[in-house]
Image (cartoon, rainbow, N blue to C red):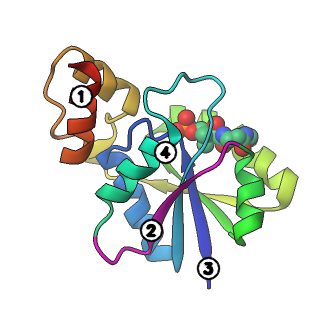
Amino acid sequence: MTIAVCPGSFDPVTYGHLDVFARAAKMFDQVIALVGVNASKQALFSAEERVRLITECLPEGSNVRADATDGLVVDYCVNVGATAIVKGLRGGADLADERSMALLNRELTGIDTVFVLGDARLEHVASSLVKDVARHGGNIDSFVPPAVARALKKEFQ
Ligand code: PNS
């Protein structure tokens, strides 16, 4: 059985992330959407809340599940027997950021990162921008599923 890990902050999960999970789900038997700690970001939602939101947004019978770690993504991968890390790319800027992380992760464990191009119609969708729109009372319905929109509205009401 092939297992892949899709790590990210997912603060919160967007339609862009869900598109990447769905693409990974076609390539691997089991996919874990892994909430990790990005030391350079201050999260709005707790890791537990982010896992809950991802889980709520996954389709029934999906081979994707959500989990969290406060350790290294590669350590988590080794523990669950994952053979690949999958990350979505929105454009060249994403690759510049992801390249060193992928090389480092491979040097640590030999686990390769598979880069997936997401739906071009979602290229502009980023959690940080969605939070900014929500914070100012804008409409975020085309960027995040209803459960996430509700959670964001609650945070900023
Ligand atoms: O969605 P993001 O913010 O780009 O996700 C970044 C994340 C959480 C995947 C990255 O910061 C990460 O892997 N953090 C976990 C700790 C770790 O493994 N660090 C080494 C990365 S080379």
Ranked by sequence position, the earlier of labels 2 and 3 is 3
In front: label 1 or label 2: 1
Query: In the image, what residue occupies the spot 29% across and 43% down?
Result: 122
Is residue 68 part of the magenta span, yes or no? Answer: yes
Mark sitting on residue 74: none
Q: Is residue 128 visible?
A: yes
Q: How far is the residue under mark 4 from the one under mark 1?
A: 16 Å
Kind of residue indicated by mark 1: Lys
Mark sitting on residue 64: 2
Q: How far is the residue under mark 2 from the one under mark 3?
A: 12 Å
Q: Quadrant of ligand 1?
A: top right
Residue 118 pos. (x, y %): 38, 52
User: Magenta residues?
Assistant: 60-70
Mark 4, residue position: 48
Q: Secondary structure at mark 1?
A: helix
Residue 54 pos. (x, y %): 38, 52
Q: Are marks 3 and 4 in contact (CB under 8 Å)?
A: no
Residue that lies at the very extreme toward the bottom in this rendered image: 1
Q: Which quarter of the image is occupied by the N terminus?
A: bottom right
Q: How far is the residue under mark 3 from the one under mark 4?
A: 26 Å
Mark 1, residue position: 154
Is disc 3's CB within 8 Å of ligand 1?
no
Kind of residue indicated by mark 4: Glu
Q: How far is the residue under mark 3 from the one under mark 1?
A: 38 Å
Mark 3, residue position: 2
Ranked by sequence position, the earlier of labels 1 and 2 is 2
Q: Which quarter of the image is occupied by the C terminus?
A: top left
Residue 68's place in the image compared with 101, above or below, is below
Is disc 4's CB within 8 Å of ligand 1?
no
The one of 39 and 90 positioned closer to us in this rendering: 39
Q: How far is the residue under mark 1 from the one under mark 2?
A: 27 Å
Residue 40 pos. (x, y %): 63, 23
